[in-house]
Image (tube, helix red, strand yellow):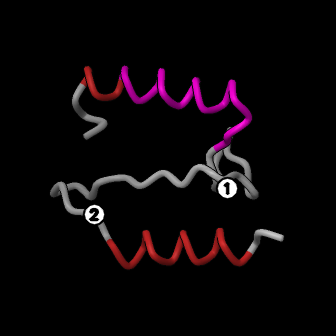
Amino acid sequence: MLNNATYRRKWKAKKAWYASHGIHQRGAGPGDDPHGSLIVTVDGPNGSISSAEIERLVDESAASRP
C-alpha cells in the first residue's frame, strides 16, 4: 500500500505521531529500535501479507518484554 501516495503520506504522519509519543518501530533498519514496540508489516509485491511473519514478529516482541 505504500505505493499509494495518499496512504504513504498518512502513514508517515501516523508514524511521526507514534514517535512523538515514545512509540518506536521495532526492527534493525535505519531509524528502527531493536526494542521498539511498534510492529510494522509490509505488503508483498503482489499485495500479499504473511500471517506467519506477523506471528513471528509478535512472538519475538513478546519474548523480549520484561
Whether 48 is drawn above or below 32: the answer is below
* Residue 3 point in image, percent of width and height: 25, 34
For marks 1 and 2, the one nearer the N-term is 1
Q: Which residue is mark 2?
A: 49
Helix, strand or loop at label 1? It is loop
Residue at image mark 1:
28
- Which label belongs to residue 54? none
> Which of 64 and 42 lies nearest the eye of the viewer?
64
**Helix, strand, or loop for circle 2?**
loop
**Rendered-image quadrant of the N terminus:** top left
- Does the magenta-highlighted stretch encompass residue 7? no
Which residue corresponds to the image point at 53% horizontal and 31% vertical from the top-left? 15
Going 37% across and 20% down the picture, which residue do you hit? 9
Q: Answer with left or right where residue 17 lies relative to residue 50.
A: right
The nearer-to-camera label among 1 and 2 is 2
For residue 25, above or below residue 10: below
Give the residue at x 58% y 24%.
17
Q: Is residue 17 magenta?
A: yes
Q: How many marks?
A: 2
Residue 25 is left or right of residue 47, and the answer is: right
Residue interval drawn in magenta:
9-24
Residue 13 placed where, x, y %? 48, 21
Measured from the top left, where is residue 52 in percent x and y? 38, 79
User: Extreme left residue here?
Assistant: 46
